[in-house]
Image (tube, rainbow, N blue to C red):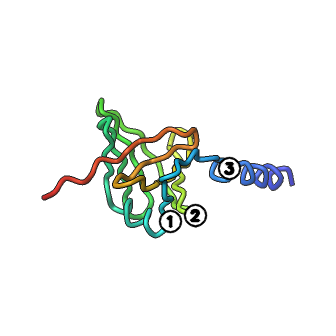
Amino acid sequence: MRTLIGLFFGLVAFPAVAADWALNETDRILDRHEVDALTAGQTLVFYDDGQSKYSVGGAYSYTYASGESAFGRYEIEEDGTVCISYRNGFSRCDRYVQSGERIILLTEKGLRFPVRPAAKK
């Protein structure tokens, strides 16, 4: 019984539910289908040279500019929120928004990380 109660409270307090997201007036939240199209099988590169790799099937890795990587699994929630569970036990949820011409990763803490446009081939 204790396990079920703990599980219930853990789900209720899950960060995706509690996040305020600190949206700007011009932000348009990407829906689940848009986020899936943006991420599935893709590597998104940020201006700090960090890279988020979303493998089809749910594997995830983030590679820092230093070359070090963190590994985990990701899931896209019904509302388009992307939740990542890292192998080290850390987890977090993010939103992708379109702000003007840019796609921005928005963290629960309100940090904004613009995605670099894909290089043209």
- The residues tagged by marks 2 and 3 sit, at their Cα atoms, a distance apart of 14 Å
Residue occupying the point 54% across, 52% down: 83
- The residues tagged by marks 3 and 1 sit, at their Cα atoms, a distance apart of 19 Å
Q: Amino acid at mark 1?
A: Asp
Q: How many marks are shown on the rendered structure? A: 3
Crowding at dot 3, Cα within 10 Å, few <14 / some 14-19 / many 20+, comes out as some
Residue occupying the point 85% across, 50% down: 2
Mark nearest the camera among 2 and 3 is 2
Residue furthest front in the image: 25
Q: Kindly identify which residue carries mark 1.
A: 31
Residue 76 image point, x, y percent? 51, 61
SS label for mark 3: loop
Q: Kindly identify which residue carries mark 2.
A: 79
- The residues tagged by marks 2 and 1 sit, at their Cα atoms, a distance apart of 6 Å
SS label for mark 1: loop
Residue 101 image point, x, y percent? 34, 55
Residue occupying the point 24% across, 54% down: 118
SS label for mark 2: loop
Looking at this view, is 100 or 68 the one in front? 100
Crowding at dot 1, Cα within 10 Å, few <14 / some 14-19 / many 20+, comes out as some
Query: On the rendered image, what quadrant is the C terminus found in?
Result: bottom left
Kindly indicate the quadrant of the structure image that contains residue 120: bottom left
Mark 2 or 1 closer to N-term? Answer: 1
Query: On the rendered image, what quadrant is the N terminus found in?
Result: bottom right
**Vertical arrangement, residue 117 with respect to residue 67, above or below:** below
Q: Amino acid at mark 2?
A: Asp
Asked if the residue at tag 1 contacts the one at tag 2, i.e. Cβ–Cβ closer than 8 Å, the answer is yes
Mark 2 or 3 closer to N-term? Answer: 3
